[in-house]
Structures are given as structure tokens and as C-alpha cells.
Image (cartoon, coloured by chain):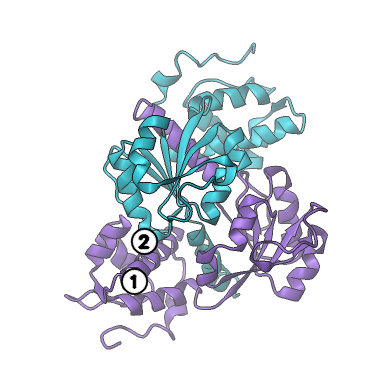
Chain colours: A purple, B cyan
Amino acid sequence: MKGYAAVGGTLMEKATNIPKATITRLSLYYRQLELMEFDGYRTVSSDKLAWLCQVNPAQVRKDLGYFGEFGVRGVGYDVKELQEQIKKILAINREWNLGVVGIGKLGSALLQHRNLQSRGFKCVAAFDNDPEKIGQIGPGGIEIRDINELDKAVRELNIEIGVITTPPSAAQYVADLFVEADVNAILNFSPIRIQVPDCCMVENIDFTVKLDILTYKLRNELGG
Amino acid sequence: MKGYAAVGGTLMEKATNIPKATITRLSLYYRQLELMEFDGYRTVSSDKLAWLCQVNPAQVRKDLGYFGEFGVRGVGYDVKELQEQIKKILAINREWNLGVVGIGKLGSALLQHRNLQSRGFKCVAAFDNDPEKIGQIGPGGIEIRDINELDKAVRELNIEIGVITTPPSAAQYVADLFVEADVNAILNFSPIRIQVPDCCMVENIDFTVKLDILTYKLRNELGG
């Protein structure tokens, strides 16, 4: 690890007011570094990492610079070591417990998503309001619970992140249940905005919105 | 429709250099309006629509103002009419043909996703490189084709939007195939950035990135 600053102790002092875009890019750098390690690379320059992630090299250095000194001039970053550091920064160096509400096609896919599991995101509970689903063993071997048991399950299983994969009309109701159960982080797959108090954080996955952006551009920019 | 400007004819002249954030919000307004119609609302004020979508009212008026005059002072927007107008703007007033590559859990979920179908996004082809999957009838009754047949299928089935749900290591290869087949819009679910020429547009769905943002915030902002 010679030449790479040990950031463990001083990391948190430095990491204040980090732009969300930086956090997003760190997550992308991490994935790219995983791929590079898989391909046998031991070091990577900020230029190459930047090119692979489609940002400029100065941005890579600035993003990492918020958290310490990770590279060696003329050598670049150690692929394995930088992954470890980013894992610490993003707090993905431990497991997180997820509860998924809405066990349709998408919810089912998430319950058995390899990428989630391998990254330490563990689906520990599944919920639905459909009497035919409740009590069944769902994908990934997880029992589907009654949505009314959410509060109890959050406490018993230490659910830290709530995942909403219900139809849009149920999303706010489910969000309220998570908030009442003191779950402070929600990943919302339903294509509407949910209202939560400031103590709760929401990230939205709007894939139908992204499709709309593509169709808009196809027609307006490419004449599709 | 009295009081609502007919934008059909002049729409495209006005719609130049629209910020992407505006397009994203239009897509959200549309979804919220759908919900409101379902709940029986006939009109909505910009204040209420803004609150529901968590933007400020001036932003709603500005976003819509790029494309014409849609509201009536003191009355607000006609819920049904505004949906129609936004559909036109976003070019989602017609069907679009999607080709999905990587028929794992996520790809399978997309092939039978109700929201996609009901919104006019039609999965017309599915591809994989797994010999055990190729030739099988996949979810939604769609035959899973050999990835090597992508170019042929794009032409035969008029695939307009490519969807990548492969592992990250295969994403760039698949993107190259879409580009070679003249598919100019790609929805990328793999958590890495793919490289495409300027004539091709990519939207990324990074749900593991969103989880990383949540864990970062849980630890740094809430002390989780």
C-alpha cells in the first residue's frame, strides 16, 4: 500500500459537503475498477479511469481529492486499493438490510438480483398486500409478508433501506409506512415522487422517465 | 378544449434547446396527472401539481411554457388535456419498439412489465448469448434470440430503442452491436458507462449507484 495515503482515520473529518454528483461518480469509478480488476489490471491512470467513466481526468482527481490522496504520480491508482477506499467512503464495506415492498415482476427480480447480493445489499424481507402472495415463499427463498407487518419486521430484521416496487398509486402509502417505522432511506422504483419528512432520504429510479427522455430526443434531435 | 392553446402545429418550432431537466419533469408531471385522472380530478393548479412533483410552481409554469400555453388563469390545467399535450411533446403518443438484451431476472421483468406495455413501449425482441436460453419462449411470450441475430432482428422488427440488462462485462459489446445496427437510443441498466458515437443516445439506470448514495448518506448524514 506504499504511496497510498491511509485515509481510514481522517476520512470523515474531510468528507463534508460533498456534492451528490461526486458520490454518484465514486460509485461509477468503483464499478469500473471492479471490471478492471476482473480484466487483470493492477493500476489505472486518472486519464484512463476518466475516459472509461466518461468524465474528465481533472474531475476524477477532484472527486477523489475530497477524501484523501490515493494515486501515485506517474503510476496512477492501485486498482484494488482504490476499490477498498471507495467502499469505505460509500459505506458499502458492510452489509445493508433491504425490505422490498411490492412483489410483482420487478420486486421479484430484485429479491434475487445477483448484483445486489454480491455488493452487500441483502434483501431480508418482502411485503405485499395481495392475500394470494402473503405467506408464500417468494423469489430468493424469502417469505412474502403482509404489508401490515412492515413495522414489526423492520424492528425484528433491522431493515435499513426500504425499496418500493409497487404501482404508483400505492407508493405514497408504503413510503408513509417506512417513515413511521423509522426507515430513513428509500429507493423508489415507482414513477412518481413520494413525500417524506427531512429525516428520510429518497432516491428515485425512473426508468420510464428515462425512456421518455429517449423518445423525446429520438423525435426532436434525430427526427425519429 | 376552450381556453387551452392548440399546440399541435407550432409545437416543434418552439421546442428548441429544452433543458433535459425540463423533459424529465414533464415525464413526472405526466405520471402525476395520470394518477390524478384516476382519482377523478378534472383540473389541477400549477401549485398543486408542483407540490405533488416536489418542484416549485414557477418551475412547472416555465417547463410547460417552453411548449405553449396550457392553463387557464384561476382554473389551472385540464388534467386530461395536459396529459395529451405532454404525450405529444415527449413523443409517447405512439408505440416504440424495444429490444432487450440479457434475459436474466431483470430482463425478464422488463419483458412483462405492465407499465411499459401500457405506455406504448413494446418489447418486440429478446436476446441472450446463453445456448440454453436461445430459442426458448421467454416471459411475455417473446422468443429469446441469439445475440448474433441482433442486427437482422433490428431490421425485421424495427427495433428503435435498445435495452441492455446484461452483466457489466458484456454491456459495451452489446452497445456496439446496437450502434452497428443503427439503433440510436439505448437504455443501459448495467452499472457502467458505455461508449457510443454522438449519433447514439444513452440513458443509464443505475440502481446500485442510487443505493450507494443512500448508504453514503445514511452513514455520513444520519450516522447510520
Residue type highlighted by circle 1: Phe
Name the residue at 38% across, 58% down: B192
Vertical arrangement, residue B156 with respect to residue A132, above or below:
above
Q: Extreme top residue here?
A: B2
The residue nearer to you, when weighing B131 against B101, is B131
Q: Which mark is residue A133?
A: none
Q: Position of residue B213 (x, y in %)?
A: 51, 63
Q: Secondary structure at mark 2?
A: helix
Name the residue at 37% across, 54% down: B171
Q: Which mark is residue A38?
A: 1
Image marks 1 and 2: residues in contact by CB distance under 8 Å: yes
Where, quadrant-wise, is the C terminus of chain B in this rendering? bottom right
Q: With B151 as the anchor, is B211 left or right in this view?
A: right
The residue nearer to you, when weighing B130 against B181, is B130
Q: Residues within 10 Å of mark 1 (few under 14, many from 20)?
A: few
Q: Secondary structure at mark 1?
A: helix
Question: Mark 2 — residue?
Answer: B169
